[in-house]
Image (cartoon, rainbow, N blue to C red):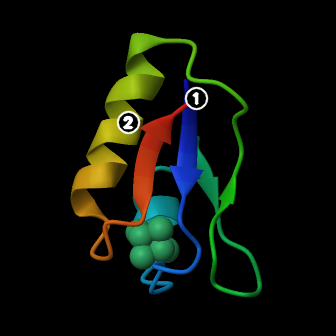
């Protein structure tokens, strides 16, 4: 399972990379870079789900 970001929806609000820096990284464009290829642990999955909840643009999702 992967973390996906819909960059067309992203508002560059930053909640993902400020609150979940193990998964997301700030970039100069304001868009998040995804740091992990696959969700491999329950802890990462929980972090990803928290990021999905706080993203104000509903731009983050989990998928294959
Ligand atoms: S929290 Fe959502 S809107 Fe904010 S930078 Fe991350 S993906 Fe974009």
- Seen in the picture, residue 43 relative to 55 is either above or below; the reply is above
Q: Out of 28 and 11, give the one closest to the viewer.
A: 11
Q: Secondary structure at mark 1?
A: loop
Q: Quadrant of residue 16?
A: bottom left
| Residue 42 spot, x, y in % from top left | 39, 13
Which residue in the structure is indicated by mark 1?
A: 64
Q: Residue furthest left?
A: 53
Which residue in the structure is indicated by mark 2?
A: 47
Residue 64 seen anywhere in this rendered image of the structure: yes
Task: Give the quarter of the figure containing the N terminus.
Answer: top right
Q: Secondary structure at mark 2?
A: helix
Alpha carbon of mark 1 to alpha carbon of mark 2: how far?
A: 17 Å
Q: Residue furthest right?
A: 28
Tell me if mark 2 has few (under 14), some (14-19) or many (20+) residues whose alpha carbon lies within 10 angstroms of its own.
some
- Seen in the picture, residue 44 relative to 55 is either above or below; the reply is above
- Left or right: 28 with respect to 13? right
> Of the residues tagged 1 and 2, which is closer to the observer?
1
Q: Which mark is residue 23?
A: none
Task: Give the quarter of the figure containing the C terminus.
Answer: top right
């Amino acid at each position: 399972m992967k973390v996906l970001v819909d960059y067309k929806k992203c508002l560059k609000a930053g909640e993902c990379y400020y609150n979940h820096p193990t998964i997301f990284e700030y970039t100069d464009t304001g868009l998040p870079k995804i740091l992990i290829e696959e969700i491999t642990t329950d802890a990462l999955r929980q972090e990803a789900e928290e990021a999905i909840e706080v993203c104000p643009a509903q731009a983050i999702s989990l998928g294959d």
